[in-house]
Image (cartoon, coloured by chain):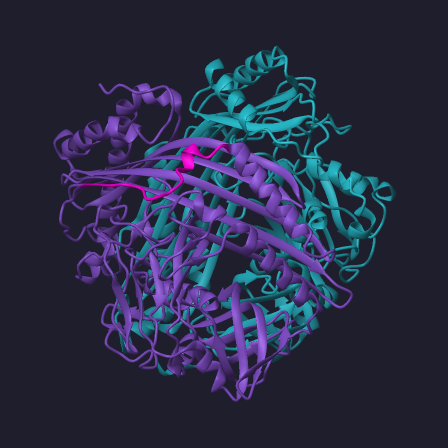
Chain colours: A cyan, B purple
Amino acid sequence: MVSLATLKRTAEEGLRYLRRQKDIQESEVFVASNDGLTARVNYTSHIPCNGVEEPKSTSSYGLGVRAVFQDPKGPRIGLGSDAGDLSLDGVKEALEKARRSAVHDPDFTTLPRPSPDRRTLTKYHDPSAMNMKDADLVHAGWRVLTRALDEFAKAGSLQALAKTGPTLRELGVIVGGDVTVLLERMAIASTRLPKVQTDESTLIASFVTAMVEREGAKGTGYGCHTRLSAMRGDAGAEAARNALSAVGGVRIKDGEYAVILGPQPVTELMCNLILPSLTAASFYDCSSAFHGRLGRPVAHEDLTVYDHGALPGHMGSKGITCEGLPTGRTDLIKNGQLVGLLSSFYETERMLRDPAAKEKLGIPPEDCPGALVPRNGFRFAGGGRRFDMAPSVAPTNVFIEGREKKTREDLLRQVQNGVYIGRIWYTYPINGLRTGDFTATIVGDSYMIKDGKLSVPIKANVVRINDNIHQVMRNIVGTASKSRATIIWAADEVVYAPEIAVARLRLTEIAGFMDAH
Amino acid sequence: MPNFSKAITTDLVEVIKNTAAELAADAPRTYKLCRYADLRIEVTEEKHAGSENGMSKYAYEDSHIACGIRVLAGDRTIAPGYVGQVLGKADLSRLAQTLAGGLKHAYARAVINAREKARIRDKYKDLGEALSDTRLAPVEVQRDTVKADYAIDPRQVPLDDMVRYITEVSRAVQDVDEQLKYNAVSAVTLVTRELFTSSEGACIDQSFALTKGSVDVVAVSETGDQELSDTIGHQRGWEVVTEGIVEEHIRNLDLLTFSTILARDAVKLAHAPPLRSSDKEVAVVTDPHFNALLAHEIIGHPTELDRALKMETAYAGRSWLLRTLNDTMIGKIVASPLVTAYSDPSLPGFGHYKYDHEGTLGRKVVHIEKGIFKGFMNNRQTAAILNVPPNGSCTATGAHLVPLVRMSTTVFAGGARAPEDIIRETDKGYYVVGHRIPSIAESRENFRISAQKVYEVRNGQIGQLYRGGGIMADSKTFLMKVDAAGRDFRLFPIPNCGKGQPMQGRRLGNGGPTLRSRAHLTGPA
């Protein structure tokens, strides 16, 4: 990776050069270096396999220039970037690209101006992760796998199955997933900001799915860390244990069920439906499920949701945004009421000037000054902080809380009879974000709830959820106080998700033909 | 040492070709335990423009270079190691050293991985037996050059012209109706040149142009609202967007006409009543645009052999078409005799290529022939496991990413019926037009896909339009109940298909004719 000092020097020298250009009104240099290391695991006892399938890495570094050019018809804003060149030549190249691509955007006001907030998070990354070696990466993948195999090898239930029928291998033991380490460094300098700022972060995640395929039993394990030393392969062991618990799964009939949603389903709903609807951009383009409802109830009064990017020890934390502004806490839903939106500087500025803002938000923007603070302008598109794109709105650490301190046992007692849903898949706003309609299938870690206790497991892939997020949010009957850092496939944000009990959820039995297959 | 120009252009591939070929060819000699190596280099020159509500929002012109390296190595076992890197102009003067360094790095990973595999295999007696050497099925070694096809070279399109055109389209969409509250129009035009070299002696230099136009609209009426998004595109030049394309299987309107039609549809839908979900299956006639996504989801994905071999269990899912190596659906009935489906990289559009990213010649792969399941798309590694020939279905979104088994262009084959006859003979049913959003079960055994428009069909006549509609069915049940296939076979671009970890979003093609089957209707919850 490129050192932070080099990134900082590039930003400083680059801005100095840009300041000297006569046709530039204002400008910004964003420099980044990102490494993504992944050990992808694929073990299948019944099919020849590699175990650790892909020990791999991708790396990139470069700089982006945003510049506002003077023009008789009005200022023009342009973005240009250059990969792999942190010299002044790189800055000049990026500037020329920005000049060629500059457009007149009537919604643009200025590059990000300093926020009244102060940065609170510094030096929070893990230096050992920054120096990760090839062997560390490969061993991390094998560690996850062997922790899972240990669980399967010692499982009495599998040994019993293997004695009476197929061998252990023929039962179809699957362990898939990965260990991913993301290393990010960035520096930003702007004519609008008082000084060059830098940030450095490490994210370590492991996500594992295990199966006893012949039994249709699937389990998940995962871990999100900021320190390499915390990655001990526990996700593999957890996934295997959960798969073993899921042996003997049953089908369920169509109907409305009282449910408890585990941390993963809660995160799926947050990342695919709720958070995309809680951005200033989705209110501007009229696609939010909460269009026109700022200041009004959008969920059961038990529910509170906020984003906080400045908490030490949390995986989604960043010291500053990719606009050079401090991260911090943004309240989104407070006791069921919509109170704030995730925003970038650009989105906040354009909403404040939008003649239709009152209709879009539900109240005039001047009546809710705290609702549009730009704490979430990031340049994420997978693989770190991208130097070749403009900031857009992205969550960081998202927290979900209830008012009462409840345990899982409290929720189970409350539901009495229903379904515990531990993992869902392909959760999409099936009729567009704005309607709130969604669908997903239950793919593992799920159980019937009988007489206030977890009962038999539910077979994987036999239930589809067809419902609406507004109904789910209104029908919340309890939220556990304990939450778990959860990340889903291809998401940049981390949701600290509790278990949530919902009075009614519409479930449909599917794929009956598979039983005869 | 090759001489490089100052800029990143597709011509760079010509300059680095011999060096990359030598590096790959020498790898087994340079590295004692190396059994195989391949190098991929990709250069893209691209331009983007986007507008919202008639206002220009961004433009972007850039070129990129990236490389990816795979090494299979080991002594007691063979295992893979990979390295990928996005490069820049400053890397050009040391490109040969960068590639050599990457090769060394990938080799080190493969060797460590192989040693660990051998150790773990010994440790777990029974469960350890599945840990095997990484083997690649043999392919004919290719040395070839493939040129890009376009009328208007994307590299020659002035960015200002793109911005002006896209902004005009966005303005035209805005003028369609005051109930259109938002629109976004964007386009990209690019040329990519890919180089593949391997220790087996392959050296493939293939280029393609690609142009895509997209539109998003939101219409809000007093009674309802509607979001719609759609895309046009082809592996051709800028003419795709400004003039459209009329080919045997592709009817690509120009972006202006395409966008304003979509906007009018959104306004109509915002006034239409919501579709009610049905308790029982009903007759559904699905149009080619809808069936493009259906083919993608219930034919293409479950016939990717890496999924079927459980390699995507944690991410994109498995396939109901293969339980174990001895228990597959090959040779079994999975659909009505009217259903034939295949993947074919020689078809035109986003999914077109001659060679995949392992240097394998792309072939047509028949998945279902008259209702009988025939086989999977594969790569060299999965083909070796199934002991079948590789069929050239392994691609990556960028050279720095690991290639995966991906669709080229996966389709339902055309039938013999006139589509209007299929509707005319439907007494009671629904006409499902245009795909929107899919949600598919993990092994692709069930789907729910929403449509742009759903019309009631009564006595063979198209009637009431509904919004928020779609269909849901078990995949096999739907395929078995197909009782009509139209002769109106069409291809469509799919702009973003996600697979892998880290996720790779890839453009590819899908298509089909009008079909009639039975499914549950799904409406707003």
Q: Is residue A261 left or right of residue B427?
A: right
The picture quadrant where one finds residue B338 is bottom left
Residue A373 higher or lower than A472, as above or below: above
Residue B442 in percent (x, y) is at 44, 66
Which of the 4 quarters of the picture holds residue A493? Answer: top right
- For the residue pair A160 and B247, the one nearer the viewer reads as B247
Q: Residue at x 77, y 62 (%)?
A: A300
> What's the magenta region?
B144-158
Instruction: Give the quadrant of the N terminus of chain A.
Output: top left
Residue B146: in magenta span: yes
The residue located at (62%, 38%) in the rendering is B57
- How many discs mark residues in the rendered view? 0
| Picture quarter with the C terminus of chain A | bottom left
- Which residue occupies the foreground of this view, A87 or B149? B149
Residue A155 visible in rendering: no
Give above or below for B163 relative to A444. Answer: above
Residue B279 percent location from the top left of the image = 58, 84
**Residue B452 visible in the picture:** yes
Within the magenta stretch, is there residue B28?
no
Front-lying residue, A288 or B311 = A288
Residue B194 location (% of width, % of height): 30, 38
Left or right of residue B110, residue B514 in this image = right
- At 36% from the left and 43% from the top, the residue drawn is B150
Quarter occupied by residue A345? top right
Magenta highlight: main SS: loop
Residue A327 spot, x, y in % from top left: 68, 34
Residue lying farthest to the right in this orientation: A367
